[in-house]
Image (spheres, coloured by chain):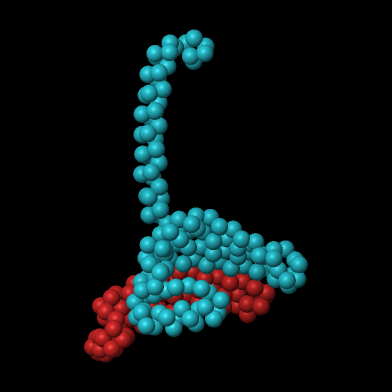
Chain colours: A red, B cyan
Amino acid sequence: MVAVLALRSDPRARRWWIPLPLFLLWLILAPLAIVWVPVVIVLCAVVEIDPFRAMGTAWQLLAGLRDLRLDVQTHEADIHMTFI
Amino acid sequence: MLAAGKVTTDQAERLMAALGRDDSGGATTAVAIEPRSMANVKYLRVLVDGTEEGHPLKVNIRVPLQLLRAGVRLASLIPARAQGAVNEALRQEGLSVDLSQIKPENIEELIDALRELTVEVDTADGSDPIKVRVFCE
């Protein structure tokens, strides 16, 4: 998954495109996730939440970001964000 | 055709009966198509078009319904004792929403309701109203 952020402060100004390769972030965070799983399970047990449902929902949220698109154009700024 | 004398009353009756069967077949087809078209709905779109203080204002948001469904599931994960505090905070902000009543089925109802919704918002400066379209596609 890649997030693309485009910003322009003024309609006449140059638009800045910032690609964010999220899949690289997931790769970096994957080893940490393995370490954090027991902590998440304990925390979920403390607040009485099913840890597997919680992790499943978190995964669905991340997966659901795909195809999210946000465009806002005003006279002050122009913001474009999309998840591919 | 009956009035024109092209068919007898008996033939007309049989024709009407046959049309009735065709009608019921047609209705079944329509019902079958409707859920399929609902299944094809993937995104919630919010389009805002208007002017603000004489300048154009455009908003184009496309939210995958999968993300909305995950959000609803997230809300259902909130422990009952925390839901009360969240409901109270929402009420103070003017939103009378009961989180315990939000279920994944509600998203389907929302999709049904949001086939096509257009709202025109009047601006404070009296210029052209801002058109807000919310629909699922």
Identify which residue is drawn at 37% across, 18% down: B14
**Please, is residue B87 above or below residue B131 in the view?**
below
**Please, is residue B52 above or below residue B78 in the view?**
above
Horizontal side, residue A28 vs residue A6: left or right: left
**Please, is residue A45 above or below residue B128 in the view?**
below
Front-most of B53 and A9? Answer: B53
Front-most of B16 and B29? Answer: B16
Asked which quadrant contains residue A44, the reply is: bottom left
Asked which quadrant contains residue A75, the reply is: bottom right
Identify which residue is drawn at 48% across, 81% down: B88
Residue reaching furthest to the right: B126
Identify which residue is drawn at 43% across, 65% down: B64
Q: Quadrant of the N terminus of chain A?
A: bottom left
Horizontal side, residue A7 vs residue B68: left or right: right
- Locate residue A45, reporting x and y percent: 26, 86
**Please, is residue B32 above or below residue A77 in the view?**
above
Front-most of A27 and B1? Answer: B1
Is residue B100 among what the camera can see?
yes
Identify which residue is drawn at 56% across, 76% down: B94
Report the number of numbered marks: 0
Q: Quadrant of the C terminus of chain A?
A: bottom left
- Locate residue B130, reporting x and y percent: 66, 64
Is residue A23 among what the camera can see?
no
- Locate residue A16, reporting x and y percent: 56, 78
Asked which quadrant contains residue B55, the reply is: bottom right
- Locate residue B87, reporting x and y percent: 46, 78
